[in-house]
Amino acid sequence: MQHDFLPVSPSDMQRRGWDALDIILITGDAYVDHPAYGVALIGRVLESHGYRVGVIAQPDWRSAEDFRRLGRPRLFFGISSGNVDSMVANYTANKRLRKKDDYTPGGKAGMRPDRALIVYANRVRQAFKEVPVVIGGIEASMRRLAHYDYWDNRLRRSILFDARADMLVYGMGETQVVEIARRLSVGEAIGTLDSIAGTAVIRKSPGFLQEFVTIPACEAVTDSHEQFNRAFGLFYREQNPFTGRPVVQAHGDRYAVVYPPPMPLSQADLDAVYDLDYRRTWHPDDDAAGGVPGLETVRHSLVTHRGCSGECNFCSLYFHQGRMVQSRSADSIVREARRLARSPAFHGTITDMGGPTANLYGADCPRWAKKGFCRNRRCMVPETCPGLDPGYGKSLPLYRRIRQITGVKHAFIGSGFRHDLFGGSVTDACLEELCRFHVGGRMKVAPEHVSDPVLDAMGKPRMAIYNAFVERFGRVNRRLSARRYLVNYFISAHPGSSLKEALELALYLIKRGMHPEQVQDFIPLPLTMSGAMYYTGKNPFTGKRIYVAKTFRERKMQRALVQYRNPSNRQLIRDALKELKAEHLASHFFEVAARKPPQRGSGSGDRKAGRSALKAGPERKSGRRRTGKTATAARPKKRR
């Protein structure tokens, strides 16, 4: 029975000879048995430890009845909103309802409620009053303390309180859920499960802790921007698994207690997670609806590592997967690639071999194994630390092995690359091999902006580093038989960006013939540094004031300047130029916009390639949705 889906109905349980389940997992996504989907991964891990696990996918939350579908679990309900925060899944950056949901059968929107964790957990309480409730996933991770909520435009308390949950699991969660299940199975009460790294609980007093850090209370951060930023700074500094202490925040007469992050999985343990027998497809119940669209971008992909030392300020990875990169062994990845190649549904192309950042497989630092990351400096900004080994000595041999597997015609890397990790003659050879064999025409990079102050606010490398990469990419490109293109990610209206900086970005794009068809409007995600800057208007570490575009009108104008080719943006561009007293630049926008877009191979912007690259699927667990991209060819400077 190992090759079956996990039970989703009483008849599935009967076929296995089970009269009850140990654990029931509830998710806001469709049930897709693939390691890129969190509930499938957690379910398989628990199953491998001998627990009977069932799944309730996208239950009807309008009553408690659907939550009774699989009966009462012996140990606990584990609840997740899915791979994406439910508010990000349901709403655009401008708070409009999304028209589709790639994690739902047929892409149908509206199949998960707003604030799904809160809704699901309270329905479970209604259906089974005494059963332990454990919440997890990205929505729980980023809301484990009092946080700014963009959609309500107010501070909300820890989601533990609103969900009335017994425990919260943050991060990837494998070690935590296994430990919770073990301790409950031997008779421990849910209210006594303390000191499990990577969890949060509610307690009447923190006095039982030997050592902890108290941050400003929920009521204090609600009343004061200064207290909010102070709380953020204190919490941020406790994220090292080796040195972190429990963080305590009062909510009225009770306390949210957040234990330190768990230690990184050993390579053997990480391999074991991905060596489990996933079906790599959606549940057959979803065939009639046409399947789950989000699976298509990851169905034939390989997760090679997790974690990201880039630590962009707008990204949730720092507080979710962590800053230290954890890589699978090459043997484990090759085994998975061979299994994939034997699948009847596989037609020769591995669509991605990567993680949150494509070129960090095998990355390492001498500190990570015993001390964790540095307390007072970042790994990659303002420049890459010389102690960080990006891992090319491990990744390139791995890719060569995968290219040799029978049945594999192409092994592409579809994740985004850190352009600042390519520097010097040594990485030129690496870049050439990647482009020659593993970039399917378009290499994704994320400069995000062109203004250095905005890039500083984002936690991104400065523009000179990107420009140097473009020159390097051009040199490599000239040695290839077929031209490769850069697909650039940009964000508009991030803190620090006013109309002036948006104009700077637009003029940069116009000069280089780059015209993104979609742009990611900045979303201030909970518990991110950029979210703190958006809410308070200050850098939480320096206290320095920072400009924030908060009106929808200005956000739309910033976006319009960058999407200058879109005819519907003309009036917004005129309004923006008038506010900037830069009407004389109108011709730069409207004359260029009137020209016929360059064709493939012309060397400027590749409109067709850009549009194709905009098709988005399941994200890694960072919370990022569709991001603006533009495809441009790298070419000799003299031809610009």
Image (spheres, grey):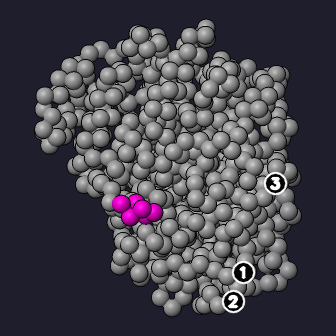
Give the side of residue 4 with respect to residue 290, left or right: right
Q: How many angstroms separate mark 1 from mark 3 (CA)?
A: 23 Å
Q: Residues within 10 Å of mark 3 (few under 14, many from 20)?
A: few
- Which residue type does callout 1 highlight? Asp
In percent of the image, x 68 and y 20: which residue is there? 429
Membership of 540 in magenta stretch:
yes
Membership of 431 in magenta stretch:
no
Quadrant for residue 6, please give it: bottom right
In percent of the image, x 47 and y 18: which residue is there? 633
| Residue at image mark 2 | 208
Residue 392, image x, y percentages: 72, 32
| Residue at image mark 1 | 194
> Do residues under tags 2 and 1 come within 8 Å of each other at their CB atoms?
yes
- Which residue type does callout 2 highlight? Phe
Helix, strand or loop at disc 2? loop
Residue 266 tag number: 3
Looking at the image, tell me whether mark 2 or mark 1 is earlier in sequence order. Answer: 1
